[in-house]
Image (cartoon, rainbow, N blue to C red):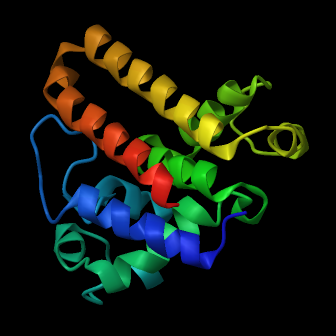
Amino acid sequence: MANDSDFKKALDFILSAEGGFNNIPGDTGGATNCGISLRFLQGTGNYELGDLDGDGDIDIADIRLLDKKNVAPIYKKYFWDCFPMAEIPAQVAYVVFDVAVNSGQRTAAKLLQKALGVEADGNIGQQTLLALNCIDSAFNLADKMCQMRKTQYVSYAQHNASLQKFLNGWLNRVDHVRKNLFEV
């Protein structure tokens, strides 16, 4: 089952995949650094973690100040601890974490639930955890989630032409996650 050591490995991947500061036109997240968007950080209302320059607001200046050290608590609180990771096999937790970062927490929970064949309500509760306890292989479940994710990204790009420019990056990211499952 996933633990703090698994979080650190997953975070290292996230930080390598997300890179530094960017503000790409057409990216709905807006200004982003280390994978944390201004829109997300403002939405948390958490000035303790988000107001890095201490000026009383969360703005683009704070996003520019994000680095590995001060972004780790944000990822831990909002993308790792929001799931019962101690009850999820490490390989599956790794995929859930990456999906949560890239597509949102509810999307990550629903993807896991769909892969398990349980009701996809976006809340990992008893039904989901019971289904997780019955799997034969954490690797196979994580791999299935990666395949489902690729299909989902292709569908996004097919239904929204403005997202097509992101498709190769998304697919490469999933391939990298899948490759790293052997190391988790």
Instruction: Look at 20% across and 39% down and name the residue there.
Output: 27
Residue 125 drawn above or below residue 88: above
Residue 51 drawn above or below residue 93: below
Residue 33 in percent (x, y) is at: 22, 64
Instruction: Look at 14% across and 64% down and name the residue there.
Output: 21
Quarter of the rendering occupied by the N terminus: bottom right
Question: Quick one: which residue is furthest to the bottom in this view?
Answer: 54
- Looking at the image, can residue 51 be seen? no
Image-based side of 137 in relation to 34, left or right? right
Q: Quadrant of residue 78?
A: bottom right
Residue 16 drawn above or below residue 144: below
Question: Quick one: which residue is furthest to the top in this view?
Answer: 159
Which residue is nearer to you in this view: 138 or 3? 138
Image-based side of 101 in relation to 65, left or right? right
| Label total for image | 0
Residue 95 in percent (x, y) is at: 52, 47
Residue 1 drawn above or below residue 125: below
- Looking at the image, can residue 159 be seen? yes
Which residue is nearer to you in this view: 166 or 55? 166
Instruction: Look at 18% across and 14% down and name the residue there.
Output: 161
Which residue is nearer to you in this view: 57 or 91? 91
Q: In which quarter of the image is residue 165?
A: top left
Residue 177 in percent (x, y) is at: 40, 47
Which residue is nearer to you in this view: 137 or 98? 137
Residue 96 in percent (x, y) is at: 56, 48
Instruction: Look at 68% across and 36% down and name the residue there.
Output: 122
